[in-house]
Each structure stands twice: as C-alpha cells, then as structure tokens.
Amino acid sequence: MKKKKTARVPAKKAAARVPVAPPPPPKSPQAIDADFVRELANVLAETGLTEIEIERGDMRLRLARTAVSPVMAPAMHTHVVSSAPMPAPALAPPAPAAPAPAAASAPAADAASHPGAVPSPMVGTAYLSAEPGAPPFIKVGDTVTANQTLMVVEAMKTFNPIPAPRAGKIIAILVADAQPVEYGEPLVIIE
C-alpha cells in the first residue's frame, strides 16, 4: 500500500505579545473597566497594531482601530465595455516636468466649471489614441456624437473608453497623451 503524502502547511505567525497589566476584577459580571480599555487603546496607538483581543474567564474584549481617510471620494459606478484586448502602450521614459506658471491654474479652474467639460470618471492614465503611433480618437475642432469614444483611461491595466456624454464640437483637449489624471479632472470640453 502506498502512503498518501500530506501537504505541509506553514504555521501561522503568533500575534505580537505586548505586556498588559491584568484588568482589575469587575464590580459586576457585565462591568468593564474603562481605564483598562483606555490602556489597551494606548497600546494600539503605541505599537501600531490595528486590533487587540483579550479573554479572561468569561469576559472577552476586542478593540479594533480603523484608519479613516479625511476626504472620502464619492462612490462611483463605472460601466466598462471591452470588445477586444487593446495592446499596452510602449513604455517611454517620463518627460521632465516643467514648472507651471501660476496663471496656468486659472484656466484649469475655468475648465472644471465649464458646462461642456467632460470629467474623468476614475484615476488613471489618459491615452488619446488606441495605441502608440495610431491617430488620436479626437482632435480640437472635431464634431463628435453622443457615446463616441473621446479617449481611453487606463486603470489597473484595464483600458476604459471615455464616451462623449453628448454630441457637439471639441473646443479643447485638456490632457496630454499618457498623462496621469485624477477623478473628476476635466479631460475635454465639448460645445
């Protein structure tokens, strides 16, 4: 008879042991000492741990800390349509960034408030053509129809087409090819 080979499972790492004074006996079976909870919270802050769990007799106490971002991005629903895999653009060394003049921030603010601005629905990298060397999807002065692809934004290795929200004329393209874009950043202005 052949013996079955058993797979070796790596042992789980033990949680870091932090010396904590035992809690004083509770005044009633349901009472929890607030000073002990504060002491455990201080241990969380000092050690950088995110969770502590203590069990003493029939009392079990679990403290968990979560990081809260001061600015929460609004929830967004993105509809991704892909018909065929798109080749990844060739990697080029990044161009040195030139310092932008202070007056450049004013047109960006105007573009965001323009009624014809098309904002980026996600964070990613904007590409003006389907592949390097291919003609761009749009040019300034072009007339587009509703749902026509204006550009693609690559996010997490997925190329997401950015459709025109309405028909009109392209009066400005506000991003360069292979430029990183933020959520809500204006990409194009359609009139």
Image (spheres, grey):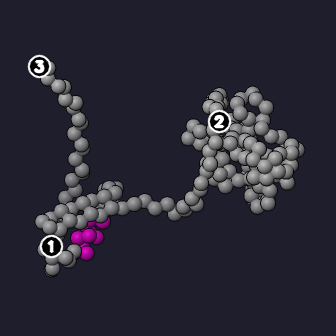
The residue positioned 14% from the left and 23% from the top of the image is: 3
Q: Residue 66: which quarter of the image? A: bottom left
Q: Nearer the viewer, mark 1 or mark 3?
A: 3
Residue extending furthest toward the right: 141
Task: Tell me the CA gap for discs 1 and 2.
Answer: 65 Å
Q: Residue 177 versus residue 122: which sits nearer the camera?
A: 122
Counting from the top left corner in percent of width and height, residue 33 is at 22, 75
Q: Residue 67: which quarter of the image? A: bottom left
Give the class, few, some or many, for how many residues have Cα within 10 Å of label 1's Cα (few <14, many ≥20): few
Q: What amino acid is labelled 2 in the image?
A: Ser
The residue positioned 24% from the left and 51% from the top of the image is: 16
The residue positioned 29% from the left and 64% from the top of the image is: 63
Residue 171 visible in the displayed image: no
Identify the residue under disc 2: 83
Q: Mark 2 touching mark 3, by CB under 8 A? A: no
Q: Residue 116: which quarter of the image? A: bottom right
Q: Secondary structure at mark 1?
A: loop
Residue 139 visible in the displayed image: yes
Query: Of label 1 and label 2, which has the lower sequence position?
Result: 1
Identify the residue under disc 1: 24
Task: Give the left or right position of residue 179, taking residue 37 as reference.
Answer: right
Counting from the top left corner in percent of width and height, residue 53 is at 24, 60
Q: Is residue 187 above or below residue 110?
A: above
Counting from the top left corner in percent of width and height, residue 102 is at 75, 55
Task: Tell me the CA gap for discs 1 and 3.
Answer: 59 Å
Q: Secondary structure at mark 3?
A: loop
Give the class, few, some or many, for how many residues have Cα within 10 Å of label 2's Cα (few <14, many ≥20): few
Magenta segment = 33-42
